[in-house]
Amino acid sequence: MIKLSGLTKAFDDNVVLNNIDLEIKKGEIVVIIGPSGTGKSTLLRCLNLLETPDAGRLAIDDIQLDLANASEREAIELRKRASFVFQNYALFANKTALDNIAEGLITVWKQPKAEARATALGILKDIGLAEKQDAYPASLSGGQQQRVGIGRAMAAHSKVILFDEPTSALDPEWVDEVLGLMKQLARQHQTMVVVTHEIEFARDVADRVIFMEGGRIVEQGPPDQILVNPVDPRTREFLRKVLKS
């Protein structure tokens, strides 16, 4: 599904991603963990060109591109295949829940408005928010807003959904409902790449856990290996701190 090679990104003299290679299979759920500031979110943002890498090649589904020199047309085609779920929801404040989901179908996929809104209503039913179709983001809880954000990604039928710390901005009471929706997607074999600090979610759902530090992939493997018996001392130290807290 995804083949990434040589991904490099620096901000001024700070190398945030250092020559990363990564392959992800169709239907695989990959969870990325690691200390803050180690490049996890930047990696996701480079995967659909919200950030422009300094170097790197990406093959996803049926397209291949040079990430550092991609055209706007290539970026649009990439984003059709890789939807993004933001930690701060990134909903349109002046649009209802239904229209937030329908907007991309209309503007990117060129669906007729009535068809897009019908699709959006079906998604709202799937995520348990049909009764909120006319609600604006300001009247929704954080958990509801994030579910709408995930619904927007679901509507596009993307090959992969990229989740950037989707629960980090939520009050604790709303975390479970968002993780529950992500688990529902996992059961449907949706390819997912998830940056998160939710270690239990990684343990329950991930096919593979990646530990990153200093802009590199330190180690990766099945949850039972990485979360229970990691090889690298940096992974062990990170998990000791996280699980202790």
Image: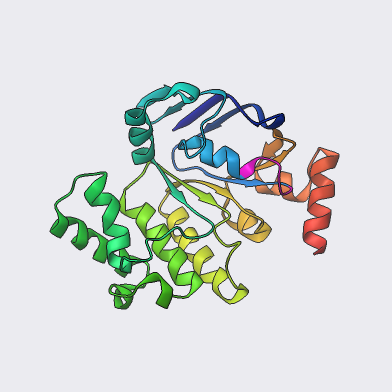
The location of residue 223, given as percent across then percent down, is 66, 48
The quadrant the C terminus occupies is bottom right
Is 113 situated left or right of 125 in this image? left
Closer-to-camera residue (46/14): 14
Residue furthest to the front: 12
Q: Main secondary structure of the magenta part?
A: loop
Residue at position x 38%, y 33% in the image: 75
When the figure is inspected, residue 19 is found, relative to residue 100, above or below; the finding is above
Q: Quadrant of residue 8?
A: top right
When the figure is inspected, residue 120 is found, relative to residue 64, above or below; the finding is below
Indicate yes or no whether the magenta region holds residue 239.
Answer: no
Which span is picked out in magenta? Answer: 35-40
Residue at position x 48%, y 40% in the image: 50
The quadrant the N terminus occupies is top left
Residue at position x 32%, y 47% in the image: 157
The location of residue 138, given as percent across then percent down, is 42, 74
The location of residue 185, given as percent across then percent down, is 43, 56
The location of residue 13, given as percent across then percent down, is 71, 29
**Which colour style is shown?**
rainbow
Is 6 situated left or right of 226 in this image? left
